[in-house]
Image (tube, helix red, strand yellow):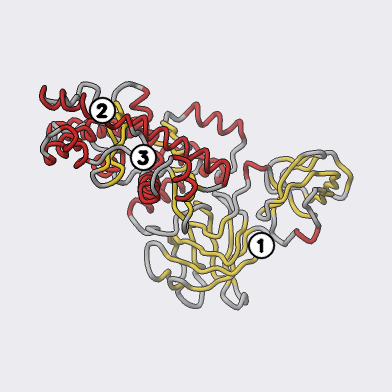
């Protein structure tokens, strides 16, 4: 494989990747500037003798890259700063087809203009290029575009983000991110990105797109204060304010509905941080739980000082109900059966069970069917065992294992689906 070393150094014996094909290769030999060499350096013309278990020379395409594994990030979308030549014979319109050239690659692309619907000759603007196939590109890479027939060059520019979103690409928030990425250094771009991304941004992708070495990444982590959660970066003050928003929302929920233990995670996210991705919100809750600033009882979240207490009459009734639920842990009596057994009005028993659910003492698995927490945990363990043995869980397998009727087995599995422990596909349920 022959080409120019674009950045860094290549050495004999190194394990690298052919990108964007993602094929592992080993460098067996190097000719730099037409001479055998142990290394090849930036700017040199090199011929690399490559080998690999899954590598074949026919896998190499014009414009491919040989690079370190951490720099691999093929893409078919690029957000760019695009300059149309003053001598272009006509304006460039939104979604125009062009030939895109970066390095040695030549690929057809569409130009999605982000600030205007037309780019006049001599003008520059932000754009997203949608390519016909994946290529390798990094922030700061220079490119040119030619017209659809490839007969003349019409413009060029610089890559700002090789991993842009497909949707909401013209919003003010997104344009602010691109303004940050136009900063001249990775340090300046990272600092401004934090201010422009209140809902966080993918830190790993930023490091890849900036083509940073592990040493440069470590230096940036030291120099730029930030909160990193599951690879998403936030300004420290924003992360702290998100935590405070959760605490304030719980306080308000307790004030408005004092007889409920608290909201579940889904409702709390909708109330306190609706734009925050679910996985990040889950990590935020985990942080608050670890700090002891919130507690979780069953699915319900609440402040440590918030408690629900039963009236003395209901507390005595709960002590009589509990043995009946534990006596048949996988098929406890329904509300009507509990009321009849204990000679209590059915509506009173239903209100008690609803309150116990809000307190996190029991789970409502199906209509008027309440299970003790430890019973649900045992049923979940059985479901996991069946999935480990058979790959999935069916109502018949689950029914036979827990010794109940098919209808109740299905209701329990549907309860696990709703709680995101499992997902249904056809007649089977799979662990998430």
Residue 42 lies left or right of residue 184; in this view the side is right
Q: What residue do we see at 19% from left, 38% from top? A: 354
The residue identified by callout 1 is: 105
Q: In this image, 321 relative to 143: left or right?
A: left
Kindly identify which numbered label has been placed on residue 322: 2
Q: CA distance from mark 3 to mark 1?
A: 35 Å
Q: Quadrant of residue 350?
A: top left
Secondary structure under the numbered disc 1 in the rendered image? strand
Residue 121 in the image: above or below residue 302? below
Q: Position of residue 367 (x, y in %)?
A: 25, 47
Query: Residue 203 at x, y = what percent?
Result: 48, 39
Q: Residues within 10 Å of mark 2 (few under 14, many from 20)?
A: some
Q: Residue at x 82, y 39 (%)?
A: 12
- Percent position (x, y) of residue 263? 24, 37
Q: Is 252 placed left or right of 114 in the picture? A: left
Q: Nearer the viewer, residue 18 or 287?
A: 287
Seen at 50% across and 39% down, the residue is 384
Residue position marked by numbered label 3 in the rendering: 195
Nearest to N terminus: mark 2 or mark 1: 1
Q: For numbered disc 3, what is the local secondary structure?
A: helix
* Separation of residues labelled 2 and 1 (CA atoms): 71 Å
Residue 432 at least partly seen: no
Given residues 121 and 61, the one toward you in this image is: 61
Residue furthest out toward the right: 36
């Amino acid at each position: 494989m022959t080409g120019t070393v674009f950045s860094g150094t290549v050495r004999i014996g190194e394990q690298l990747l052919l990108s964007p094909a993602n094929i592992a290769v080993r460098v067996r030999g190097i000719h730099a500037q037409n001479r055998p060499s142990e290394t090849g350096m930036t700017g040199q013309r090199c011929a690399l003798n490559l080998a690999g278990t899954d590598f074949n020379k026919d896998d190499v395409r014009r414009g491919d890259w040989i690079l370190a594994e951490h720099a691999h990030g093929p893409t078919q979308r690029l957000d760019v700063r695009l300059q149309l030549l003053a001598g272009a014979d006509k304006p460039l319109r939104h979604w125009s087809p062009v030939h895109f050239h970066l390095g040695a690659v030549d690929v057809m692309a569409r130009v999605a203009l982000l600030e205007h619907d037309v780019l006049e000759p001599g003008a520059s603007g932000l754009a997203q290029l949608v390519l016909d196939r994946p290529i390798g590109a990094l922030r700061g890479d220079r490119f040119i575009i030619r017209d659809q027939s490839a007969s003349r060059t019409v413009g060029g520019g610089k890559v700002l983000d090789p991993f842009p979103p497909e949707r909401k690409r013209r919003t003010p928030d997104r344009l602010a991110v691109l303004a940050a990425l136009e900063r001249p250094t990775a340090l300046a771009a990272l600092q401004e990105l934090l201010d422009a991304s209140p809902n966080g941004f993918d830190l790993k992708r930023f490091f890849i797109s900036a083509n940073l070495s592990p040493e440069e990444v470590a230096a940036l982590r030291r120099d730029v204060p930030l909160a990193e959660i599951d690879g998403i970066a936030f300004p420290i003050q924003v992360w702290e304010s998100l935590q405070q928003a959760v605490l304030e929302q719980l306080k308000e929920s307790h004030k408005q509905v004092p007889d409920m233990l608290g909201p579940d995670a889904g409702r709390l996210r909708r109330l306190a941080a609706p734009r925050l991705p679910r996985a990040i919100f889950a990590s935020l809750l985990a942080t608050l739980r670890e700090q002891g600033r919130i507690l979780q009882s069953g699915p319900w979240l609440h402040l440590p000082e918030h408690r629900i207490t039963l009236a003395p009459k209901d507390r005595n009734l709960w002590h009589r109900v509990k043995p009946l639920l534990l006596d048949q842990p996988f098929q406890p009596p329904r509300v009507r059966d509990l009321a009849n057994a204990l000679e209590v009005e059915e509506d009173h028993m239903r209100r008690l069970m609803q309150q116990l659910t809000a307190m996190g003492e029991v789970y409502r698995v199906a209509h008027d069917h309440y299970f003790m927490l430890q019973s649900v945990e045992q049923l979940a363990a059985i479901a996991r065992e069946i999935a480990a043995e058979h790959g999935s869980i069916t109502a018949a397998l689950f029914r036979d294992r827990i010794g109940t009727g098919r209808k109740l087995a299905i209701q329990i599995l549907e309860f696990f689906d709703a709680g995101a422990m499992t997902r249904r596909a056809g007649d089977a349920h799979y662990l998430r």
